[in-house]
């Protein structure tokens, strides 16, 4: 993977709240992602909960939608410097730029709907959201109630050191998955799925899996088209993405399957309890999105997976 050194990093698509001190600390109450309009949806919501046995997560008791927007001044200065792409936060901001540039065109072309941009919130340790207070143990997530993506960038250390997903392309895959949830929100897929869960609670987990696998597929569709995305000045954002990069995304998808997480935590693997999909399913649906490059191929809700 090579980023274009001449591409402009648009930090207005990021809300930098690191160091603001708002959020859940380490005493949050993990809640299921099927929690109605305010429920978070994320790539590995239960990663740290599974690994350490609970105690980290989203605090459902506090509805914290009043978090002030962060101050991007420092980030904007850093990301306009010559060495911007050597910085983790600036690279991630550029990944966000690419993902949103893709959906700006792909959403109306594929589904006839206008894309409404979202921001990605960089936070440290904890953050207030319209879905409640969250801490880093939740992992990256999307909150449908405020239409924002949230990530503590130290999550990538967990991904690499504890889950073995060390490749650089794991990072844009994570973000592309979360923006897949934003697309689901814009299309009404997420809300429809929540209503189905309420009507059929026995299948709530299976419906959650379908939502997550579709987000994986959307991430694959972006990856296929990422080299065609450009900044606001028309500069390409990626100059190349290799098959090795795609394999890194596939490896990441496999390592964060529900069965892989259970194995790593020395817990029994119970498909009835899956909320994100097995390793094989996550690999399959990301690969489908990448192979076709077409988000219309990502209909996980029709028939069996």
Image: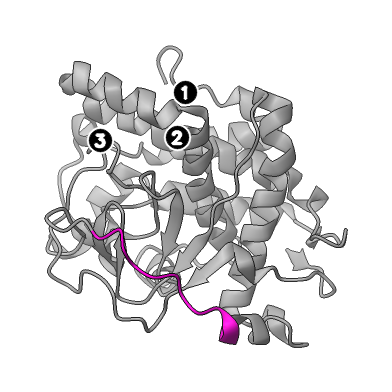
Left or right, 164 with respect to 85, comes to: left
Mark 2 Cα shell of 10 Å, populated few (<14), some (14-19), many (≥20): many
Q: Which residue was labeled with disc 2?
A: 213
Name the outermost residue toward the right.
234
Give the residues drawn in magenta, as a range.
64-74
Comparing labels 3 and 1, the label whose residue is closer to the camera: 3
Mark 3 Cα shell of 10 Å, populated few (<14), some (14-19), many (≥20): some
Residue at screen point 35% across, 25% down? 193
Name the image quarter holding the N terminus.
bottom right
In depth, the one of 182 and 91 nearer the eye is: 182
Q: Which residue was labeled with disc 1?
A: 300
Comparing labels 3 and 2, the label whose residue is closer to the camera: 3
Instruction: Give residue 231's quadrant in the image.
Output: bottom right
Residue 44 covered by magenta stretch: no
How far is disc 3 from disc 1 in space, using C-alphas? 20 Å
- Return the x and y of residue 279 as percentages of the image width and height: 40, 41
Mark 1 Cα shell of 10 Å, populated few (<14), some (14-19), many (≥20): some
Mark with earlier residue (3, 2): 3
Residue 73 covered by magenta stretch: yes
- Return the x and y of residue 140 as percentages of the image width and height: 40, 58
Q: Which residue was labeled with disc 3?
A: 36
* For the residues bearing labels 1 and 2, Cβ distance under 8 angstroms: yes
Mark with earlier residue (3, 1): 3
- Return the x and y of residue 112 as percentages of the image width and height: 68, 24
In depth, the one of 102 and 167 nearer the eye is: 102
* For the residues bearing labels 3 and 2, Cβ distance under 8 angstroms: no
Dot 3: what SS? loop
Instruction: Give residue 290's quadrant in the image.
Output: top right
How far is disc 1 from disc 2 in space, using C-alphas? 7 Å
- Return the x and y of residue 232 as percentages of the image width and height: 80, 60
């Amino acid at each position: 993977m090579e980023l274009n050194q001449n591409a402009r990093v648009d930090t207005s698509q990021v809300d930098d709240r690191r160091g603001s001190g708002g959020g859940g600390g380490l005493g949050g109450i993990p809640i299921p992602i099927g929690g109605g309009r305010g429920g978070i949806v994320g790539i590995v919501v239960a990663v740290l909960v599974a690994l350490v046995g609970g105690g980290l997560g989203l605090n459902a008791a506090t509805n914290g939608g009043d978090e002030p927007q962060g101050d991007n001044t420092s980030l904007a200065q850093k990301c306009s410097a010559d060495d911007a792409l050597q910085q983790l936060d600036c690279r991630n901001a550029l990944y966000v730029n690419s993902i949103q540039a893709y959906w700006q065109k792909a959403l109306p072309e594929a589904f006839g709907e206008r894309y409404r941009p979202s921001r990605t919130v960089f936070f440290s340790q904890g953050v207030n959201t319209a879905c409640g207070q969250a801490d880093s143990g939740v992992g990256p997530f999307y909150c449908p109630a405020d239409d924002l993506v949230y990530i503590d960038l130290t999550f990538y250390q967990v991904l690499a050191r504890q889950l073995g997903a060390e490749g650089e392309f794991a990072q844009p895959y994570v973000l592309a998955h979360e923006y897949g949830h934003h697309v689901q929100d814009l299309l009404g897929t997420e809300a429809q799925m929540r209503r189905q869960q309420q009507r059929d609670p026995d299948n709530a987990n299976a419906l959650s899996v379908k939502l997550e696998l579709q987000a994986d597929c959307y991430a694959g569709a972006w990856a296929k088209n990422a080299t065609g995305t450009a900044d606001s000045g028309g500069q390409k954002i990626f100059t190349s993405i290799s098959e090795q990069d795609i394999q890194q995304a596939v490896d990441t998808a496999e390592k964060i399957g529900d069965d892989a997480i259970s194995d790593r935590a020395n817990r029994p693997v119970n498909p009835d309890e899956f909320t994100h999909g097995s390793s094989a399913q996550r690999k399959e649906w990301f690969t489908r999105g990448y192979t076709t490059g077409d988000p219309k191929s990502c209909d996980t809700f029709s028939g069996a997976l």
